[in-house]
Image: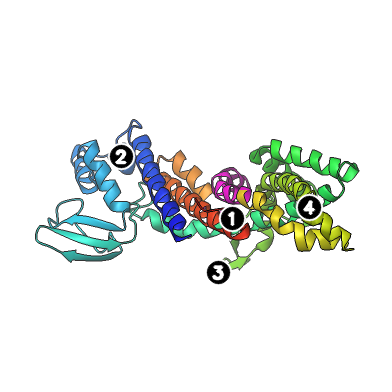
Amino acid sequence: MLRFVYKRILVGIASLFGVLSMVFVLFHIVPGDPAQMMLGQNQSDEQLNIVRKKYGFDKPLITQYFLFLNDVSPISFHSQNPDDYSFFKEEKYTGISISLRKLDIAVKLPYLRESFQKAGKNVSEVIAETFPNTLMLALCAITIAMSLGCFLGIIAAINKGNIWDNSIQFLSTIGVSIPSFFSAIIIAWLFGFVWYKYTGLNMSGNLYELDDFGEGSVLQLKNLILPAVVLGIRPLAVVSQLMRNSLLEVLDQEYIRTARAKGLTAFQVVWRHALKNALNPGLTAVSGWFASMLAGAVFVEYIFGWNGIGKELVHALNVSDLPIVMGIVLLIAVVFIVINIFVDILYILLDPKIKVA
């Protein structure tokens, strides 16, 4: 088991390294001068050269690549020359450094560099302000999808072939087919505008909003309902289909027929014996969907005005704030890798029949 965990962690690290390299290449072959993006169009050549030297933009591309890897690595190497980009500055890096003969070795938090447009604000600060909102939105959406999807899948499996089964499969097909941005617009318009006097829900809004006096923030959980429902529609449809098919397969097993022969009710058979073994496909699907929600939340957050990393990503793309775009892409990749490792381990624990290679 431990060998399997170590192997998955190594594969995850290799995958993350590939993502880091791809992100760097993609965003550094984009035409445009990063220093010009930071300062605007009305700056002198002297100011541009100062910025290029400060952030390492004046160095060859391969050198910039290794400096980028050095910044995001938790163990990094730094020059002892204060004029070099890689010099360890306490206001720049969060960690500790040990001085050796010709360089410093540091143990630190990954440094995602500074925003081009937010007056020297670190990308990690921007993510720390917005990621909790996206995480809450994704958790609520996946909770809705998993609970309601499992319930509908069980109902469909128990009523195989009748109107309940056909209706649930029809709705699931529609749920998977409709893009998130389209369902977000429709649901926001219907529940936040047309039926507002019945629902009391807003078309847009954040988790915290200013109070009536503009002096403090007020928690608005109702603003979470519509975006969470929209974000959960597609995984809900997938989970219900997987749950139905998996449960039908499990219900056809020999031990289920034995349980029925003992006089157990349909509810007891499903709850005590079949459900645990039928959950594995849905659990695997949820792992991928949860990480995908962070990327899919871009459209949902933008339409509902939800202050998360999706909305921040759209804004960063509009103003060419490449460090924020790179930081958010890397964050999504890390979450995806970690969740997949966790689910692989959980999958084995839930199903003892699976052998660890």
Highlighted range, magenta: 285-308
Residue at the limit of the structure toward the left, as seen here: 101
Residue at mark 3 to residue at mark 1: CA–CA distance: 49 Å
What element does badge 2 sit on? helix
On the image, numbered disc 1 is attached to which residue? Answer: 347
**Mark 2 or mark 4: whose residue is earlier in sequence:** 2
Residue at mark 3 to residue at mark 2: CA–CA distance: 38 Å
Residues under numbered marks 2 and 4 in contact, where contact means CB atoms less than 8 Å apart: no
**Mark 3 or mark 4: whose residue is earlier in sequence:** 3
Residues under numbered marks 1 and 4 in contact, where contact means CB atoms less than 8 Å apart: no
Residue at the limit of the structure toward the top, as seen here: 31
**Mark 3 or mark 2: whose residue is earlier in sequence:** 2
Residues under numbered marks 3 and 1 in contact, where contact means CB atoms less than 8 Å apart: no
Is 109 located above or below residue 295 in the figure? Answer: below
Q: Is residue 169 visible?
A: yes
On the image, numbered disc 4 is attached to which residue? Answer: 254
Callout in the foreground (2, 4)? 4
